[in-house]
Amino acid sequence: MAKGLFILGTGTDVGKTYVSALLVKCLVEAGYQAGYYKAAQSGAASLSESDAGWVKAVSGTKQETESMVSYSYQTPVSPHLAARLEGGYAHLSVIQSAFAGLCRQMELVTVEGSGGMICPLVYEPNRQLMLLDVIQALRLPVLLVSTAALGSINQVVLTAQYAAANGISLRGILINRYHGGRMEEDNCRMMETLTGLPILGYVAEGAKAFPLPAEVVSSWYGAAD
């Protein structure tokens, strides 16, 4: 059975897909059978133009694009609204089955979340499905992705506290688009101090490869608890 890692962002546009692509690329180049999965995405005209398509192109994984995402919507809004507008509501059982199937084919699976932790995938009067439900169901180690920009301390701490309140254990923090300098260095120190979580790595703006070796990266992956 494969091991997995859930990539959770502090919000939209912190670089979850970018980080996921570099992680999978790092593992593929080291000889692992490494794959990618995202339960739901929106704002993509086709799979080849989607987050999944981009990850495949960058990482070099041989995985079929169709197995990388279960629900894909064209409207660039939150998945729950895109589903309401286009149809095709997400089902947790489908997500679990798709992930399990991928685990039978791969050694290491990188699972990317949608938006931030409080992201509704379905929100209708008779049924709700939140990203939190997916994280809880898959029971994987979780890596929190953030930038170190102004405001990032608040975003990281609130996400970490919400995760803890809902029984989600975070493996650590990954800083994306890291530039260094006094403010970003201090923001990172404050993130560690206020959450008690380690910063596991720093990805520079525009990086073409993950900054840590595959043996370190692979150690972050784990089987479902």
Image (cartoon, rainbow, N blue to C red):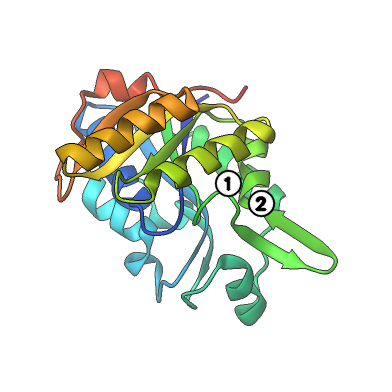
Identify the mark at residue 94; answer none if there is no mark: 2
Q: Position of residue 80 (x, y in %)?
A: 63, 68
Inspect this view and state whether residue 207 appears.
Answer: yes
The quarter of the picture where the C terminus appears is: top right
In the image, 132: left or right of 109?
Answer: right
17 over 126 or under it: above or below: above
152 over 169 or under it: above or below: below
Identify the mark at residue 48; answer none if there is no mark: none
* Corner quadrant of residue 163: top right
Q: Position of residue 76 (x, y in %)?
A: 46, 75
Q: Position of residue 96 (x, y in %)?
A: 64, 43
- Give the CA distance from mark 2 to mark 1: 6 Å
Q: Residue at x 34, y 35 (%)?
A: 174
In the image, 47: left or right of 81?
Answer: left
Labels 2 & 1 near each other (Cβ < 8 A) = yes
Depth order, front residue of 106/162: 162
Three-letter amino acid code of the residue under disc 2: Val
200 over 114 or under it: above or below: above
Q: Residue at x 47, y 29 (%)?
A: 194
Three-letter amino acid code of the residue under disc 1: Ala
Identify the mark at residue 98; answer none if there is no mark: 1
